[in-house]
Amino acid sequence: MTIPQQDQTRAEDTREHTAETTFPPSPEFIADAIADSGLHDAASADRVAFWAEQSRALLEWRTPFTSTLDWSDAPFARWFADGELNVAENCLDRHVRAGNGDRVAIHFEGANGDTRTITYAQLTADVQRAANMLAGLGVGQGDRVVVYLPLIPEAVVTMLAIARLGAIHSVVFGGFSAESLRARIEDAGAKVVVTADGGWRRGAVSPLKPAVDEALQGEGTESVEHVLVVQRGGNDVAWTERDRWWHDEFAAAEPEHEAQAFPAETPLFILYTSGTTGKPKGIVHTSGGYLTQAAYTHKNVFDMHPEKDVYWCTADIGWITGHTYVVYGPLANGVTQVLYEGTPDEPQPGRWWDLVDSYGVTVLYTAPTAVRAAMKAGRQIPEARSLESLRLLGSVGEPINPEAWQWYRQVIGHDRTPIVDTWWQTETGGIMISALPGVTKLKPGAAQTPLPGIVAEIVDDDGHRVDPGGSGYLTITEPWPAMARGIWGDPDRFVETYWSRFPGRYFAGDGARLDGEGDIWVQGRVDDVMNVSGHRLSTAEIESALVGHEGVAEAAVVGAADETTGQAVVAFVILTTEASEGVDRVSAATELRNWVGKRIGAIAKPRQVVIVPELPKTRSGKIMRRLLRDAAEGRRIGDTTTLADPTIMATIAELM
Ligand code: WTA
């Protein structure tokens, strides 16, 4: 594996210009900042002791741990292993006991205009009752529950109720298809599925339960005993014997639930993510270490003052960002947050900014793709709002280009707010590389510094550390509390995927550059993983969906640079002889786009499907994706001399 050369230069080109513009923290920010340089000092003095200290300070342990890190079975880490805690109690009950029950936990804003204000006391009561409800459906320690819900309070309640029981949730994003859902239910061996009749999108109900029904007709889903259905859309749904309405079961459940303490390494959740092969991986996270890093990063990176901040992370709970920075981090820290079901521009452009103003949001965490979409819509939209409450902005999901960074700071942050560009992954569980507001001098476009307690290095092809100014692969050299504990049901794949390319190092799949001051500039994936609107998609998974269509003989998928979504899916397809007879290219392309949507989910639909007579292959039959990417991005096609048929790229370029 080598870093595609043209990607590297492209990334550097845009960034070099602005690298000199830096933003030191303002004296006002420093005066009240949570993080200070003492964190770095403490972590470098004794990294493991530092994490132990953080964990004791941030969480409530029922049985205090005496062992901090056990790395004897590397790369399978055990953190705080002899300690016991209950994750939900840490996110809820203890805040109520500390006298903060009246603090708002969630300001919910539905996509259809309904709102709910939920205090910590109310959320605690709801989760206790929901835990009893799930226990009544047979859910207990170690059982898997698949959650397929819109972004509504019940989703948060469900996740925490599952955690409270020592069971394991696996949230599947509502945009995934019935088939994707089925595969996840099967792999996890889920006992219960929690869903809704439907969710709201742009004034209409988009049904969810039919996908669950379809998934459960598929193979390998016999483990599911019950489907619990939240009434949200009010749409008609088919009903079977295993189905239960949430509101019926909830009303019938006992209100009080005493949380039991579980060992720190009790699995908390499985979250499926795309890799370089066709089959999504079930990333496993456990309790004590994950919650420690969730709380620590949330507090220090977002400068959380729970008594006065109103925090808003725009991610859906179907992604890791929603797990760590909507559910576990903010609630462990007892913070007030906004939860919004809809899109940035419904029912009118600027809805997000209206929400910032109406709730007085102080800290906003979103993805570069959303910033670029707002840029495109025009600055007059946010400029017509106050946005004065904002004091810190965050970015996650993909590299943020310096232009978007500058716009975000100027137009949304009024030239005043720090921006934290946070690099991390589903596998890392929590933020790994980010500026610390109040400490770090900010550089637009760079993720910058490993957080205190994290050790990252950029290495070359041979695994040697690169010097400042050099580029290579981003690796993590020391275990961290929220690291994945494995891939569900496939320990070998975990070792092979992340720990074999550079022995002794975790290799994340990203390329990065180290600048002269030792700051890290993440440059994006160097493998076959695409990043579309901050969502991870695998080229292999989409290719395998395409060749699953009877009319497709061969398919190659690339991620092409896209102004708004970062990357976009472009598919090159050879039809079978039968299918290509008298075919209309446009309708074939439309059919295949929809096919991918049906197989994987709407988020994976290619921006473009190009029907081609042949793919660019070397004489040994290897598809040269680099050339396809050139074509998809409208660039001059690179060197074609090693191709079996050197003329094919001219044909493909013409077809585009
Ligand atoms: C990319 C999302 C550059 C990266 C939390 C990583 C980023 C993948 C950044 C993980 C960032 C995330 N700068 N790239 N600040 N944040 N990425 O698992 O390629 O959905 O490997 O986790 O997103 O995506 P995932």
Image (cartoon, grey):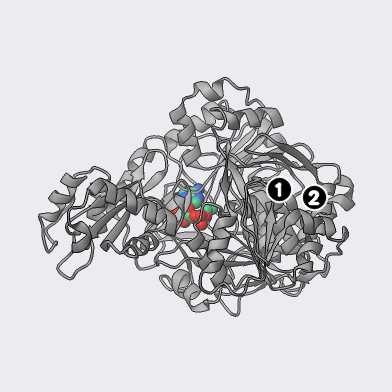
Is 226 placed left or right of 184 in the picture?
right
Residue at 53 percent across and 64 percent down: it is 215
Q: Is mark 1 within 8 Å of ligand 1?
A: no
Dot 2: element:
helix
Tell me, yes or no, if residue 271 can be seen here: yes
Give the amino acid type for the residue marked by disc 1 in the picture: Pro
Is 365 placed left or right of 80 in the picture?
left
Is 222 above or below relative to 155?
below
Is 221 placed left or right of 517 in the picture?
right
Dot 1: element:
helix
- Mark 1 highlights which residue? 153
Give the amino acid type for the residue marked by disc 2 in the picture: Leu
Q: Position of residue 113 (x, y in %)?
A: 66, 34
Q: Position of residue 654 (x, y in %)?
A: 16, 45
Q: Position of residue 254 (x, y in %)?
A: 87, 61
Q: For residue 226, which quarter of the picture?
A: bottom right
Image quarter of the C terminus:
top left
- Mark 2 highlights which residue? 123
Tell me, yes or no, if residue 609 can be seen here: no
Do residues under tags 1 and 2 come within 8 Å of each other at their CB atoms? yes
- Which is more toward the observer, 75 or 97? 97
Q: Position of residue 86 (x, y in %)?
A: 78, 64
